[in-house]
Image: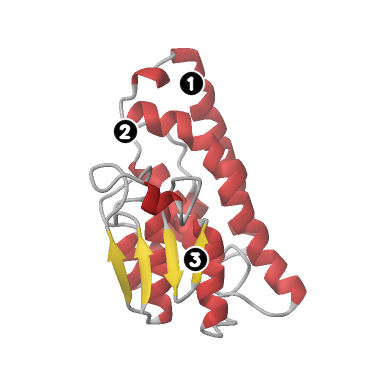
Amino acid sequence: MLKLLGKASSINVRKVLWTSHELGLTLEREDWGSGFRSTQEPEFLALNPNGLVPVLIDGARVLWESNTICRYLAGREGRRDLLPQEPGARAAVEMWMDWQATDLNGAWRYVFMSRVRGHADYQDAASLAAAEREWNRLMGLLDAHLAQHGPYAAGAAFTLADVVLGLSLNRWLMTPFERPEYAGLAAYQQRLLQRPGYVQHGANGLP
């Protein structure tokens, strides 16, 4: 039995849950993180010294980093539609997954912590405005890419890149701040809503 450590409201845990839904996998999940067991407990830190969710346990194998876990599960199940084997096609998927984990993740943090969490350390007006502009700019890059190379991030077919980007798109749409009207992203959202895994773990009312 695969075990997943992390609360179901976490955006990174939801990536793994959506991927598992696409793969038809059943996970045994334990709640860890804010509001549940602390990820600073020695038991958790022995599995992930970063103290972050999610953590996947597959027998003797322990993995952390949500995008890595998604890739592992797709490879484990032989789902080359979600993670191609051919180097160029695979790189196209992983390029957008890595962009989501680095550039895009870094852009939304200040806005999310300010607008959704109301954290006192994220209330500087100038910093907030700059972060909002940058987040919108990066979403505009995705919008333009989809318009030219879509309908999905890596081209014609749905892949793991769309799982991680779909969760990021949902967070952008659910965070209360001014956003441009990107037609490409609106159409992308409608395509993703045709997938039950996104409805359950992405567009589920959580940012």
| 53 with respect to 87 (left or right) | left
Residues at marks 1 and 3 touching, judged by CB atoms closer than 8 Å: no
Residue 116: image tag = 2
x and y, in percent, of residue 137 in the image: 58, 36
Q: What secondary structure is found at the residue carrying circle 3? A: strand
x and y, in percent, of residue 25 in the image: 37, 80
| 1 or 2: tag closer to the N-terminus | 2
The residue at the point 39 percent across, 52 percent down is: 44
x and y, in percent, of residue 167 in the image: 42, 54
Q: Quadrant of residue 27?
A: bottom left
- For badge 1, the amino acid type reads Ala
| 3 or 2: tag closer to the N-terminus | 3
| 1 or 3: tag closer to the N-terminus | 3
Instruction: Name the residue that disc number 1 marks.
Output: 129
Q: CA distance from mark 1 to mark 3?
A: 39 Å
Of residues 183 and 47, the one nearer the viewer is 47
- For badge 3, the amino acid type reads Val
Of residues 164 and 77, the one nearer the viewer is 77
Judge depth for marks 1 and 3 and give the one in front. Answer: 3
Q: CA distance from mark 1 to mark 2?
A: 15 Å
Instruction: Name the residue that disc number 3 marks.
Output: 62
Q: Outermost residue, right direction?
A: 88
Q: CA distance from mark 3 to mark 2?
A: 31 Å
Compared to residue 81, the image places residue 48 above or below, namely above
Judge depth for marks 1 and 2 and give the one in front. Answer: 2
Q: Bin the neighbour count of mark 2 within 10 Å (Cα to Cα): few under 14, some 14-19, many 20 and up.
A: some
Q: Quadrant of residue 94?
A: bottom right
